[in-house]
């Protein structure tokens, strides 16, 4: 009798969703290796609308985007790729920038006056992500000198410093400013573990002392 009651009790327990990484391709509809698709709009909308509140995993491939990838003002988000890569020449080794373990590479094709990535919340992590402006030997500096930014770190409203973001391993290539701290944020709001920077005019810039 006790066994039957226990079995019945188990059947009526609510089914809780599993806490696991979200897959950017399977769960959000991102499209790697499609130069015509704006993955930035998809990722930013999902974050803003609350569909991503923990970890977002990106399988290997090239994620083109013409819209800034914005972490919104969420706390504790993690964007995780497959590991970093050296900046590669477009068209080399078959499809551009893919060899070996097929890392997750983000190629920003949008306007130079907007950053490729923007972190605004608290405690965001970027792990195994590659943030590029074009490919090696073809940096998109024409008309964008002094403007293009790979990773902008700021916050939505003034107040307590946002941050203690954790960045790395991350590669940034082809930028006027690879990493830019924008007021009212401070450069001490982020912990960097490993940054691989190639062909950037400035690696780190800060507009707030």
Image (spheres, rainbow, N blue to C red):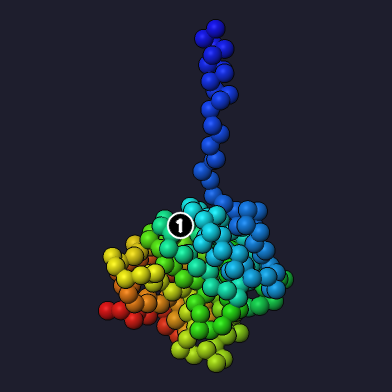
Which element carries disc 1, helix, strand or loop?
A: loop
| Left-right relation of 146 to 38 | left
Q: Position of residue 177 (x, y in %)?
A: 44, 81
Of all residues, the one furthest to the bottom in this rendering is 143
Disc 1 marks which residue?
77
Q: Is residue 159 visible?
A: yes
Q: Nearer the viewer, residue 150 or 89?
A: 150
**Residue drawn at (54%, 14%) of the image:** 5
Image height of 183 relative to 44, above or below: below
Q: Position of residue 130 (x, y in %)?
A: 53, 68
| Left-right relation of 188 to 117 | left
**Residue drawn at (54%, 40%) of the image:** 18
> How many labels sit on residues?
1
Tell me where residue 45 sits by quadrant: bottom right
**Residue drawn at (62%, 60%) of the image:** 60
Q: Is residue 82 visible?
A: no
The N terminus lies in quadrant? top right
Of all residues, the one furthest to the top in this rendering is 1
**Residue drawn at (38%, 61%) of the image:** 122
Q: Position of residue 20 (x, y in %)?
A: 53, 46
Image height of 98 relative to 140, above or below: above
Q: Nearer the viewer, residue 69 or 145?
A: 69
The C terminus lies in quadrant? bottom left
């Amino acid at each position: 009798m006790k066994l039957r009651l226990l079995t019945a009790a188990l059947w009526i327990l609510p089914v809780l969703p599993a806490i696991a990484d979200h897959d950017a391709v399977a769960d959000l509809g991102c499209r790697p290796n499609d130069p015509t698709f704006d993955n930035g709009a998809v990722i930013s909308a999902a974050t803003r609308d609350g569909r991503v509140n923990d970890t977002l995993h990106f399988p290997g491939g090239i994620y083109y985007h013409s819209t800034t990838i914005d972490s919104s003002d969420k706390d504790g988000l993690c964007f995780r790729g497959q590991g970093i890569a050296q900046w590669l020449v477009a068209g080399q080794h078959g499809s551009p920038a893919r060899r070996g373990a097929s890392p997750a590479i983000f190629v920003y094709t949008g306007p130079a006056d907007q950053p490729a990535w923007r972190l605004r919340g608290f405690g965001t992590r970027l792990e195994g992500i590659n943030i590029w402006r074009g490919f090696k030997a073809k940096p998109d500096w024409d008309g964008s000198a002094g403007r293009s930014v790979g990773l902008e770190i700021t916050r939505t409203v003034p107040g307590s410093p946002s941050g203690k973001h954790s960045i790395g391993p991350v590669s940034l290539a082809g930028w006027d400013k690879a990493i830019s701290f924008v007021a009212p944020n401070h450069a001490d709001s982020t912990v960097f573990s490993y940054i691989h920077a190639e062909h950037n005019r400035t690696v780190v810039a800060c507009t707030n002392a």
